[in-house]
Amino acid sequence: MARNLNSRIVRAMISLTLLAFTVVYFGLTAYFFFIYEWLYPDFTDDDILRTGDIVTLGLLLGIGILTASLLGWVLARRIVDPLKSVAAAARKVANGDFSARASLSRGNFGEASDLVDDFNQMAGRLQRAEAELKYSNSAIAHELRTPLTILRGRLQGLLDGAFAPSPELYGRLINHVDDLSAIVEELRALALSNAGQLDLQYSRLDLAVEAEAALISLEDHFSKAGITVMRQLSSAVVSADRARLRQAFVAVLENCCRYAPQSTVHVETGVAGQYVFFRCTDTGPGLPEESRTRAFERFWRADDSRGRSGGGSGLGLPIVRAIARAHGGDASIFPSDHPGLAVEIRLPCQVLPFV
């Protein structure tokens, strides 16, 4: 295809040049041999072009055609070479080689450079997406395997008579099922968010009220973790999905219980310019900078074994960011003024018209 395009460009330029020169050549010939005599009946033979002049004009036109052909070939190469490189790289990507990149030689047009750069960026995103998908598949299998193994072991123990049926045992089995259901729901929410299909039910609400409700629901967790909660809840009215925001607030607060026990947690809500915010700051061990940049990656944990033993799936903060972005806002993590960490959710003051 590239060769055909190359030859077509050359042929098109030659044809256009030939047509232009042919029109000029025959136009001048007709003018001086026929029209000139009619316009100026008193002309002499010395006043018109001689045969040698016509030949010279033809040679000049031939040189012009040759020059146009050469320029057309150079131009075609500069246009086609980047397309050939992109096409070759695209075939590799289509065959599963996401490391393929298009190359660009010197002297190409700016548009060709933009095309190659855009393709390489797309290929890079596909490569990262493939790597993330492989990691996610492995992590999903790992996360589901642990509660499933425990659940199967307890059910097998009941079947073999190793465990006596009791309300406590049934309660633990139900908790394992709930853990599995929570992981599946979090994965579903992330998938919908990535596809831009996360369904939001908007209503008028106050972040201060929702934050207080989330804190009340986790009072037992705070008590077991030895956490002292400090509140600074200012009114921050916004139109948003109440259930999704409550889910995000609970996820942030649960992280404090898991990773910052025996600390003081400051919870704030308020308005800052065109945004409302929910901010949770703890006095725990915090995270180094390289870990903070990965905190919103799915299934990532700063301390994998501690996170799993504490019941974390590694999906909490990714869910928080997904919910915030679905509302047109964002979530960020940064060190606090004291040892510890701060997580902030910011939403535009009016995500949608109030309903």
Image: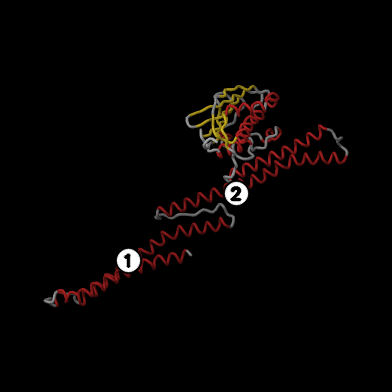
Q: Which mark is residue 248?
A: none
* Res. 171 visible in picture: yes
Residue at the extreme front: 355
Residue at the extreme right: 161
Near-viewer residue (288 or 175): 175
The residue labelled by disc 2 is 130
Quick one: label 2 or label 1, which is nearer the N terminus? 1
Question: Looking at the figure, which quarter contains the C terminus?
Answer: top right
- Determine whether, in the image, residue 316 is placed left or right of residue 39: right
Q: Position of residue 34 (x, y in %)?
A: 20, 77
* Residue found 56% across the figure and 55% down from its top: 93
Residue 56 lies in quadrant = bottom left
The residue labelled by disc 1 is 67
Residue at the extreme left: 42
* Residue found 40% across the figure and 52% down from its top: 110
User: How far apart are labels 2 and 1 at the CA level?
Assistant: 49 Å
- Determine whether, in the image, residue 57 is placed left or right of residue 267: left
* Residue found 69% across the figure and 27% down from its top: 221
SS type, badge 1: helix
How crowded pointer 2 is (Cα within 10 Å; few <14, some 14-19, many 20+) is rated as some
* Res. 33 visible in picture: no
Q: Amino acid at mark 2?
A: Glu
- Determine whether, in the image, residue 232 is placed left or right of residue 104: right
Q: Position of residue 308 (x, y in %)?
A: 70, 35
Q: Position of residue 290 (x, y in %)?
A: 57, 35
Near-viewer residue (190 or 198): 198
Q: Amino acid at mark 1?
A: Thr
> In the image, which is nearer the foreground, mark 2 or mark 1?
2
SS type, badge 2: helix
- Residue 341, above or below 78: above
Q: Are marks 2 and 1 in contact (CB under 8 Å)?
A: no
